Amino acid sequence: MRTPSAESVFVNDKIARMSHSPAPQFGAIIIGDEILSGKRQDKHLPKLIELLAARGCTLSWAEYVGDERTRLTEVLRRAVAGNDIVFSFGGIGATPDDHTRQCTAAALGVALQPHPQAQALITQRMQEMAAEKGEAFAPQRPDNVQRLQMGVLPAGAQIIPNPFNRIPGFSCRGARGAWLHCVPGFPVMAWPMVAWALDAHHRDLHQPQAYTERSVILFKAQESALTPLMQAVEMAHPGIKVFSLPSVDHPEYGLHIELGVKGKTAAIAPAWQQLTEGLHRLGAQFGPELQRQI
């Protein structure tokens, strides 16, 4: 079965979004009791940040939630209430502790229904598994019937191709334009699927300009004294964020505040100049300056 290309999907979605405003933000939902219990360490959040950064985008928010239907449904309902683009990791399998398909349908107020393309891909994978074992494919065998449940998706869902084992993820739209992309919890599957969704559906949000973060270490400074300057810089430079990161036990700098600006590289210089000039007027005690691409 032919999988839609990122290019063909992108063209249709760009046309659909042309009238949307304000600009959507990227979010993440990471699902699983094993994450909250500490049994497994989450790897999805840093990877999603990396995949977004490679496209000049940034992550605005993230939530962790366990395998509990009521809470998960509420988290998903909030996620699709606006026009954000949200990636959900985990819970799309067919075991009793996988609830993402059911909770997504409930959050959107739609029914679950067999998705022909998804079920065809799952069937193809089951046939391959049988062939690898030298067995005849038995579609009515209970475990195969259960696997097909992974192709029962919220009404209106689109599939996300899975290059690892064909079992697809899925994407849904909210009433106000939100995107919810649901992928497996396995990184080897999830990360290529996230990259595909970013390129297939959201290439018009990719930023050709890099983002830069520039900061300075300040000693013997108080955040309360810096706040008016931070507010003034943000007001004078729309699109620039001013940040303050205090530390009491840094192994190199000890007690200090890292104060800086971040935003599109082309807009950083004037904001940085205003910030440092203001710090000099305050008599700030400067340490090293830092800069990185984000």
Image (cartoon, rainbow, N blue to C red):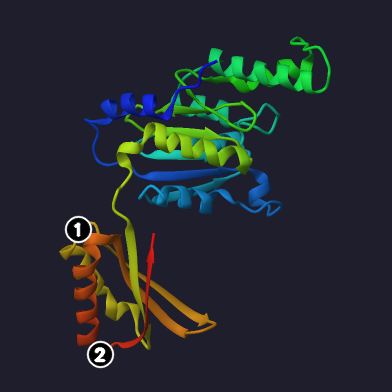
Q: Position of residue 244 (x, y in %)?
A: 36, 71
Rendered view: 200 above or below 118: below
**Residue displayed at 57% across by 30% down:** 162
**Residue displayed at 28% across by 78% down:** 226
- Number of callouts in the render? 2
The amino acid pointed to by label 2 is: Gly
Q: Which of 71 and 282 is in front in this view?
A: 282
Q: Position of residue 221 (x, y in %)?
A: 35, 85
Rendered view: 211 above or below 183: below
Q: Which mark is residue 80?
A: none
Q: Where is residue 261 in the image (x, y as percent from the top left)?
A: 30, 68
Is residue 168 visible in the rendered image? The answer is yes
Quadrant containing the N terminus is: top right
Tell me the residue that label 2 is attached to. 283
15 to the left or right of 244: left
Q: How far apart are marks 1 and 2 (CA)?
A: 26 Å
Tell me the residue that label 1 is attached to. 238
Rendered view: 102 above or below 245: above
**Residue displayed at 37% across by 88% down:** 220
First in sequence, mark 1 or 2: give its number: 1
252 to the left or right of 289: right
Q: Residue 137's image quarter?
A: top right
2 to the left or right of 200: right
The amino acid pointed to by label 1 is: Pro
Farthest residue in the left direction? 236
